Image (cartoon, rainbow, N blue to C red):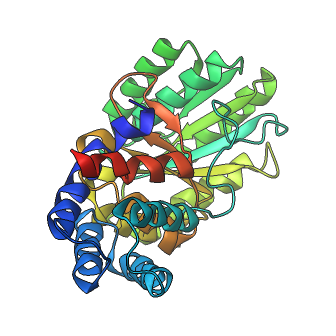
């Protein structure tokens, strides 16, 4: 089982149960089959706009050859999904390599996302991955509004074997960010990853806070942050899309990480978010283990989401 098979297994199973019922005994692609595909895509939380785009493209492609096999139809679905995910820098063709520009030193990564999406866990797993590839890493605990956030980041720093910069609860997040980047420069670290508060109830406050963090770290590294990574919980479906829209209004998101896909039948939200936001996904989380943060590969993801072999089961 491939890493993406594991990550979207429930989405895959739900889609093919619906599709198999729709095509039972059929030898041609008709309106009923296309309607069933549309229903299945919407049910996987791909979103209506993205689903309609896929259906319209499929209708054009099957118009002249409605007697294609279901395997061929599924192949088309794979191609359509991969095309929608093909935004700038959305994947990494070299298996195993991390999709970052390490010519920046220190590479400054600002991580944003609401509480509970797996933000701190994602930071810890990313730090571990970077460390395993020979990079020196410093974490910045700038989510100072929750004591648990700092404690959790400390645990992950210890587990990954990387440094951490932190202050007491209630400290100015921008001050922590400044100290973190300053420490990275002084220690000649390769990467500094800064955690931020996960509050979304007031966009103006969020925007002001993130702007302040940007401004202070630019006093140390003028072109920072080099990455603003938004972490989303894939199991929340369309709520994840709404979060992405709100954060995009508050700051310039450069990439995304989608967590908890292994326990959800809503893996289609990955396609919908990228299609609507035009922001690349760089990582997906498919488990609780420290190695279960995987570099996103659009072709492998599409292949796992629509596996023609399941039609014969």
Rendered residue at 38%/29% (across/down): 1
Q: Is residue 312 visible?
A: yes
Residue 195 is situated, as x and y percent measured from the top left of the image, at: 51, 40
Residue 311 is situated, as x and y percent measured from the top left of the image, at: 27, 52
Residue 67 is situated, as x and y percent measured from the top left of the image, at: 38, 76
**Viewer-proximal residue among 83 and 92:** 83
**Viewer-proximal residue among 306 and 295:** 306
Rendered residue at 47%/33% (across/down): 293
Q: Is 275 above or below relative to 99? A: below
Left of 91 or right of it: where is 76?
left
Quarter of the C terminus within the rendering: top left
Rendered residue at 48%/66% (across/down): 76
> Could you say which quadrant of the image residue 288 lies in?
top left
Residue 27 is situated, as x and y percent measured from the top left of the image, at: 27, 72
Q: Is 205 above or below relative to 98? A: below
Furthest-right residue in view? 103
Q: Is residue 117 visible?
A: no
> Could you say which quadrant of the image residue 259 lies in?
top left
Q: Is 284 above or below relative to 242? A: above
Rendered residue at 40%/32% (across/down): 121
Task: Give the number of marks.
Answer: 0
């Amino acid at each position: 089982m491939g890493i993406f098979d594991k990550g979207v297994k429930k989405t895959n199973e739900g889609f093919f149960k619906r599709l198999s019922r729709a095509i039972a005994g059929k030898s041609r692609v008709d309106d009923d089959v296309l309607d069933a595909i549309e229903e299945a895509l919407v049910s996987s939380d791909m979103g209506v706009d993205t689903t309609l785009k896929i259906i319209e493209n499929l209708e054009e492609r099957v118009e002249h050859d409605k007697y294609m096999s279901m395997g061929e139809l599924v192949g088309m679905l794979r191609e359509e999904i991969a095309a929608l995910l093909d935004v700038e820098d959305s994947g990494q063709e070299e298996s195993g390599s991390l999709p970052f520009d390490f010519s920046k030193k220190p590479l400054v990564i600002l991580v944003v996302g609401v509480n509970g999406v797996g933000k701190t866990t994602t930071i810890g797993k990313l730090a571990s991955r970077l460390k395993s590839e020979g990079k020196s890493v410093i974490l910045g605990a700038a989510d100072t509004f929750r004591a648990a956030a700092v404690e959790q980041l400390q645990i992950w720093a210890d587990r990954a074997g990387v440094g951490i910069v932190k202050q007491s609860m209630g400290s100015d997040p921008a001050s922590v960010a400044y100290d973190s980047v300053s420490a990275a420069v002084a220690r000649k670290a390769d990467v500094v990853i800064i955690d931020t508060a996960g509050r979304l109830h007031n966009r103006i406050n969020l925007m002001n806070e993130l702007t302040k963090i940007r401004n202070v770290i630019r006093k140390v590294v003028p072109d920072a942050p080099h990455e603003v990574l938004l972490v989303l919980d894939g199991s929340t479906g369309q709520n994840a899309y709404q979060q992405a829209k709100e954060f995009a209004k508050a700051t310039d998101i450069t990439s995304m990480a989608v967590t908890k896909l292994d326990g959800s039948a809503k893996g289609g939200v990955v396609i919908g978010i990228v299609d609507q936001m035009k922001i690349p996904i760089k990582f997906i989380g498919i488990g609780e283990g420290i190695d279960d943060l995987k570099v996103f590969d659009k072709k492998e993801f599409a292949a796992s989401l629509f596996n023609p072999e399941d039609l014969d089961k």
